[in-house]
Image (cartoon, rainbow, N blue to C red):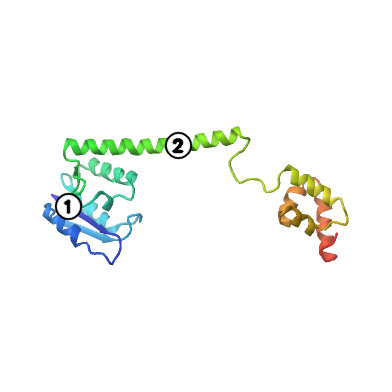
């Protein structure tokens, strides 16, 4: 038995074009819904899949009506095949009940795996290049060693306020405290307190 599934992107669109094409293809039942293909929750598709039995064929007007991505499409069709259900797309003339159609989906699967491998290799190559340049993953340091040394030198001058240090280095008080407070927390805490009491002067 042929079972149709139609999907339109918005409520303003009509599913009649798809529905007519599916009925002409011999679909006895047609399930449809309105919504973006990116949505994971598709109750119309779930109803169609629940309705179907072994030996049935799910028919769509175009491949993009069924899958949210190539990976999603392949997973859906593989799930159908495991249940003994065929798949047919009218526009692309893909039919997994034939040897040629099954070959097409094997090629789709190989392409999807190839794409995943390319992305993985590019990511690993990028990380390796970053490590070779002395960089590690994660967010960059706000204050490098040069800024830390400059901050400590300025803080030794009692005439330089915390605010002036922060403005000169372009960092917040919290950042200054986090980087420079190490090894001199009590002194820096005292400077913070002095600044507040003296209107921002050290």
Q: Check disc 2: other Cα within 10 Å, few if <14, some if 14-19, many if 20+.
A: few
Q: Secondary structure at mark 1?
A: strand
Pointer 2 or 1: first along the chain: 1
The residue at the point 16 percent across, 54 percent down is 22
Q: Quadrant of residue 70?
A: top left
Which residue is the site of mark 2? 120
Q: Position of residue 164 (x, y in %)?
A: 79, 58
Which residue is the site of mark 1? 3
- Report the residue that reaches farthest toward the right: 158
Q: Position of residue 193 (x, y in %)?
A: 82, 60
Does the residue at mark 2 contact the one at mark 1 (Cβ under 8 Å)?
no
> Could you tell whether 103 is left or right of 183 in the image?
left
The residue at the point 71 percent across, 44 percent down is 144
In the rendered image, the vertical position of residue 83 relative to residue 202, given as above or below: above
Quarter holding the C terminus is bottom right
Q: Check disc 1: other Cα within 10 Å, few if <14, some if 14-19, many if 20+.
A: many
In the rendered image, the vertical position of residue 61 relative to residue 75, given as above or below: below
Q: Secondary structure at mark 2?
A: helix
Q: Position of residue 170 (x, y in %)?
A: 71, 54
The residue at the point 26 percent across, 55 percent down is 45
- Depth check, mark 2 against mark 1: the one in front is 2
Q: Which mark is residue 59?
A: none
Q: Position of residue 18 (x, y in %)?
A: 19, 57
In three-dimensional space, the C-alpha distance between marks 2 and 1, rounded to whole angstroms, equals 38 Å
> Could you tell whether 11 is left or right of 151 in the image?
left
């Amino acid at each position: 038995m042929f079972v149709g599934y139609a999907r339109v992107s918005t409520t303003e669109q009509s599913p009649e074009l798809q529905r007519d094409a599916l009925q002409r293809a011999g679909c006895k039942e047609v399930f449809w819904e309105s919504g973006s293909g990116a949505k994971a929750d598709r109750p119309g598709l779930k109803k169609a899949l629940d309705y179907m039995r072994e030996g049935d064929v799910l028919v769509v007007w175009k491949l993009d009506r069924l899958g949210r991505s190539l990976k999603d499409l392949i997973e859906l069709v593989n799930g159908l095949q495991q249940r003994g259900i065929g798949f047919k797309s009218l526009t692309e003339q893909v039919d997994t009940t034939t040897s040629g159609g099954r070959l097409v989906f094997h090629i789709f699967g190989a392409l999807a795996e190839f794409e995943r491998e390319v992305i993985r290799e590019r990511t690993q190559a990028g990380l390796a290049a970053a490590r070779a340049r002395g960089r590690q993953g994660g967010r960059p340091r706000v204050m490098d060693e040069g800024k830390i040394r400059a901050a400590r030198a300025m803080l030794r001058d009692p005439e330089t306020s915390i605010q002036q240090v922060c403005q000169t280095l372009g960092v917040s008080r919290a950042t200054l405290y986090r980087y420079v407070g190490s090894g001199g927390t009590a002194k820096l805490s005292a400077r913070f307190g002095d600044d507040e009491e003296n209107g921002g002067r050290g």
